[in-house]
Amino acid sequence: MATNDLDRVVPLNQLDGYTVADGEPDVRGWEVISSDNRRVGKVDQLLVDTGAMKVRYLDVDVDDALVAGGDRHVLIPIGYARLEEGRSRVLVDSLAATDVAALPAYAHGPVARDTDDDFTRRFGAPAATGERASQARITRSEEELAVGKRETEAGEVQVHKHVETEHVSRPVSLAHEEVTVERRPVTDPGMAAAGRIEDEEIRVPLMEEEAVVEKRVVPKEELVVRKREVEETEVVEADLRKERVEVDREGDAREPRR
């Protein structure tokens, strides 16, 4: 812009009889979102080139959290802005939040002649209006389920033995000797002649069997403890979110012919 053209770029609220054209959105008060998806402020005013009858800059009131001292305004050329009308937001795809915070403060005075050139040097040239319309992008994302495996302790198996006492009985046949006394008359004459009266004693030992209990340890069985890996199929369930893109057309917007 030539020096005498600086006064042509004026905030819209200072122009009598100037309003936003019918059918065009008035972005004053809209949130400004940086390329890293952070709110960096809101549009305070539109700076209009009265000669070309076009908006040249957005006067953005930067959020106090981004700048020390607060109450800071910056200018963003309209070419760097993209409107998201459905959500009343202005997207600055070339500027991160730190970029916006580092812009020179706008003191509501004349616009510097090299403002556009400074932006171009810092962030590259903005897309042309027609290119912006054809290159506007929206990213559709969705969640995917990533299933991994890790080993966790599920428990343990203990094998131990203990001693129990069981009362058992077994039948055993035992033999023993008994004495029987038989009385009978003496018929032998010789025995009768030798008879005499005296004390006499006969001892007859008696024998019997008795049960002898003996306990011995006898191995009966062996337990072999092993572990093996068993693979099972388990169904993992989760709720996944996905974005869907819907296109709403208003006014004279038409679908391209196929």
Image (tube, helix red, strand yellow):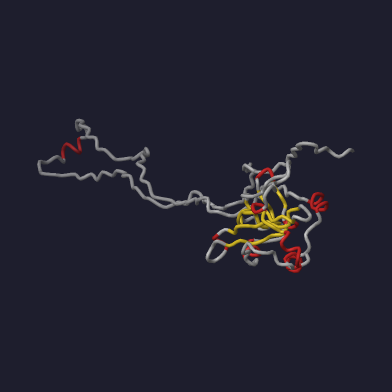
Residue 201 visible somewhere in the drawing:
yes
**Front in this rendered view, residue 256 or 85:** 85
| x and y percentages locating residue 209 in the rendered image | 32, 44
In the rendered view, does 187 fall on the left or right side of 162? left
- Residue at 50 percent across and 50 percent down: it is 155
Q: How many marks?
A: 0
Q: Is residue 94 above or below residue 214?
A: below
| x and y percentages locating residue 150 in the rendered image | 60, 54
In the rendered view, does 197 fall on the left or right side of 129? left
- Residue at 77 percent across and 50 percent down: it is 136
Q: Which quadrant of the rendered structure holds the C terminus?
A: top right
Give the quarter of the image for residue 40. Answer: bottom right
Which residue is farthest right?
A: 258
- Residue at 16 percent across and 41 percent down: it is 194
**Front in this rendered view, residue 132 or 112:** 112
**Front in this rendered view, residue 227 or 22:** 22
Give the quarter of the image for residue 112. Answer: bottom right
In the rendered view, does 69 fall on the left or right side of 89? left
Q: Is residue 32 above or below residue 171?
A: below
| x and y percentages locating residue 202 in the rendered image | 19, 44
**Front in this rendered view, residue 116 or 152:** 116
Residue 144 visible somewhere in the drawing:
no
Q: Which quadrant of the rendered structure holds the N terminus?
A: bottom right
